Image: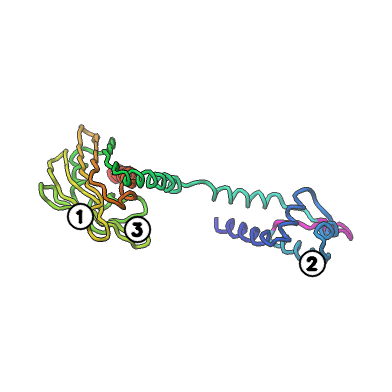
Amino acid sequence: MADVADDVQQALSAMGEPTRFRIITLLAERPYAVGEVAEALGALQPQTTKHLQALEAAGVVTVHRLGRRRVAQLDRGVLGGVAAHLAALAEASPDDIALADYGRAVDRDEALVAAGNAGRTLRFERELPAERRAVWSAWTDPAKAAQWWAPRHFDVTTFELEPKAGAQIRVVLREGDGAEHESRGRVESARVGRLVFTLAPLDPAGRPLFSARHVVTMTGRGSTRLSLSIEVTDVQPGAAAAVAGLEPGWSQLLDALTDFLAE
């Protein structure tokens, strides 16, 4: 793959010069004699020859020596390879799509926060490939929870949770650039199969951006049916990005939980 990328970069570098790009456009019609290329460009033949040599060295153009004539022709295969490489780069990744969706959600929630109408209840369902006690442990054992309790491109640096009423919860997530995001809350009730807690992100001053009450239930034998509801209230100004991130963030967390249990 590195060799392909190097070839593409070399071709693009040669083609990027304005006069050479005009030559590429001209040769896209048909092969031209070098003198014809110079005439079409309004340039001297020695200058045109140098440009063609650069394109030939990059593999974009082939110059055929036909006796005393020299005829330049595009290498369509090389151009096809460049086009395929660029087309692959142009394909949206899942992260591109998620970021675009998140941007639209932030715009929506900024308007809702401004109108004082940003509260909501989110609901998630998952069928998990583990029995109920294993799922319970994945939620309540800090060492295990820290392995899945982070969206993509984040890491858990701190995870504090004790499954008993009144216990404090503290979660710190770190982005790739080193920025950290802290959330705090408290356990309301905890028994195997049902966990109720509050957890909300903090602003730079350490104040909750909103109130978020989480109710997790785990039912079934063999595999486990997990239900999560999150009731969001008391949304503060400036909380739109955090509120908008709840739905995609928890979707990613539950996907990570599913993968963790499957392993």
Q: CA distance from mark 2 to mark 3?
A: 52 Å
Rendered location of residue 64, percent (x, y): 81, 56
Q: Who's the residue at 83% across and 59% down the image?
A: 34
Q: Who's the residue at 29% across and 46% down the image?
A: 260
Is 122 situated above or below 147? above
Secondary structure, mark 3, is strand
Relative to residue 66, is residue 98 drawn left or right?
left
Relative to residue 43, is residue 247 drawn left or right?
left
Categorize mark 2 by other alpha carbons within 10 Å: few (<14), some (14-19), many (20+).
Answer: few
Secondary structure, mark 1, is strand
Q: Main secondary structure of the magenta part?
A: strand
Q: Is residue 216 visible?
A: yes
Asked whether the beta carbons under mark 2 and mark 3 sit within 8 Å of each other, the answer is: no
Is 154 situated above or below 194? below
Relative to residue 180, is residue 1 drawn left or right?
right
For label 1, the residue is 170
Residue 247 sits inside the magenta stretch: no
Rendered location of residue 32, percent (x, y): 82, 53
Secondary structure, mark 2, is helix
Q: Quadrant of residue 231?
A: top left
For label 3, the residue is 175
In the rendered structure, which segment of residues is drawn in magenta? 59-71
N-terminal-most mark, 1 or 2: 2
Hey, what amino acid is under mark 2? Gln
Hey, what amino acid is under mark 1? Arg
For label 2, the residue is 47
For the residue pair 95 and 140, the one nearer the viewer reads as 95
Is 119 situated above or below 56? above
Residue 62 sits inside the magenta stretch: yes
Categorize mark 3 by other alpha carbons within 10 Å: few (<14), some (14-19), many (20+).
Answer: some
